[in-house]
Amino acid sequence: MTRTPSKPQAIDAFIARKAEIDAMLERLAALSADHFDTSPDEINWGHVGTLAHYAELLKRITDAAFKEGEHAE
């Protein structure tokens, strides 16, 4: 027989995961504010491709979180 973890354990795990997400978002916001560590004189199509990849990954996350795109009901 398997035992289901208690509600307080679930709350603790939820808070820990939320803290992870908050830290990642804070780092991304700081990187974005710094133009992704790229000066205007250095920008090339490789940088554009990298940002497009980041945007695609973030879109998947926001679509899931807000039930949009392929996650729409």
Image: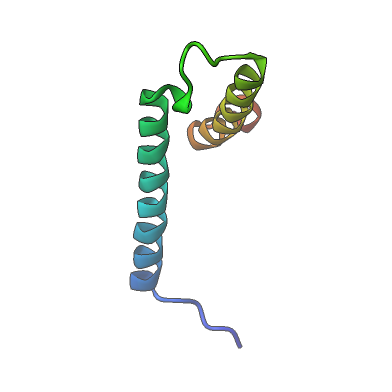
Location of residue 61 in the rendering, given as x and y in whole percent from the top left corner: 55, 36
Q: Residue furthest bottom?
A: 1
Question: Where 48 falls versus 25 (above or below)?
Answer: above
Considering depth in this image, is 55 or 3 the residue closer to the camera?
Answer: 55
Residue visible at 55% across and 30% down in the picture: 63
User: Residue 5 or 15: which is nearer the viewer?
Assistant: 15
Which of the 4 image quadrants contains residue 55?
top right
Which quadrant would residue 13 be assigned to in this image?
bottom left
Query: Is 45 located above or below residue 66 in the figure?
Result: above
Q: Answer yes or no: is residue 41 visible.
A: yes
| Residue 16 percent across, percent down from the top left | 37, 60
Viewed as shown, does residue 5 lie left or right of 54? left
Location of the C terminus (image quadrant): top right
Q: Position of residue 1 (x, y in %)?
A: 61, 88
At 58% from the left and 84% from the top, the residue drawn is 2
* Residue 73 seen anywhere in this rendered image of the structure: no
Q: Nearer the viewer, residue 2 or 63?
A: 63
Horizontal side of residue 15 vs 72, given as left or right: left
Is residue 38 shown above or below 21?
above
Residue drawn 50% across the image and 11% down it: 41
Q: 31 or 25: which is nearer to us?
A: 31
Location of residue 28 (image quadrant)? top left
What sort of colour scheme is used for the picture? rainbow
Is residue 70 shown above or below 15?
above
Q: Position of residue 38 (x, y in %)?
A: 48, 22
